[in-house]
Amino acid sequence: MFLTETKNNIKTIRSTDPDFIICDGIVITPRAGFEITKDCPREYKLIIAECINNGWLGPIAHQPIHEEFMEKLTK
């Protein structure tokens, strides 16, 4: 049996991770979020809100490792 480990060059950042919030010196903002258009039916908006409030649905962001490296170098 052979096991192969694949190196991933993409980092997943969850809303509970410290790197999820970004700051440009003035503005502090999350890396990812949800956008629900005004055309979304009200019933669906309520369901989505319930899912977010219960922790069943949450934002994540993906970032290439080289971008994370460059970001940390500039700090």
Image: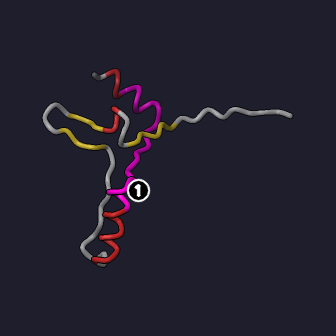
Instruction: Between residue 26 and residue 42, name the one nearer to us.
Output: 42
Q: Is residue 27 left or right of residue 68?
A: left
Instruction: Between residue 5 and residue 58, name the one nearer to us.
Output: 58
In which quarter of the view is residue 38 placed? bottom left
Instruction: Between residue 36 and residue 70, name the one nearer to us.
Output: 36
Q: Is residue 58 magenta?
A: yes
Residue displayed at 50% across by 38% down:
10
In which quarter of the view is residue 70 placed? top left
Q: Identify which amino acid the numbered label 1 is placed on.
A: Leu
Q: Secondary structure at mark 1?
A: loop
**Residue 41 appears at what percent x and percent y?**
30, 78
Q: Is residue 47 magenta?
A: no
Q: Is residue 6 left or right of residue 23?
A: right
Looking at the image, the residue that sits furthest to the right is 1
Residue displayed at 37% across by 56% down:
54
Looking at the image, the residue that sits furthest to the left is 26
Residue displayed at 16% across by 31% down:
25
**Residue 2 appears at what percent x and percent y?**
82, 33
- State which region is magenta: 51-70
Label 1 crowd bin: few (<14), some (14–19), many (20+), radius 10 Å: few
Q: Which residue is mark 1?
A: 57
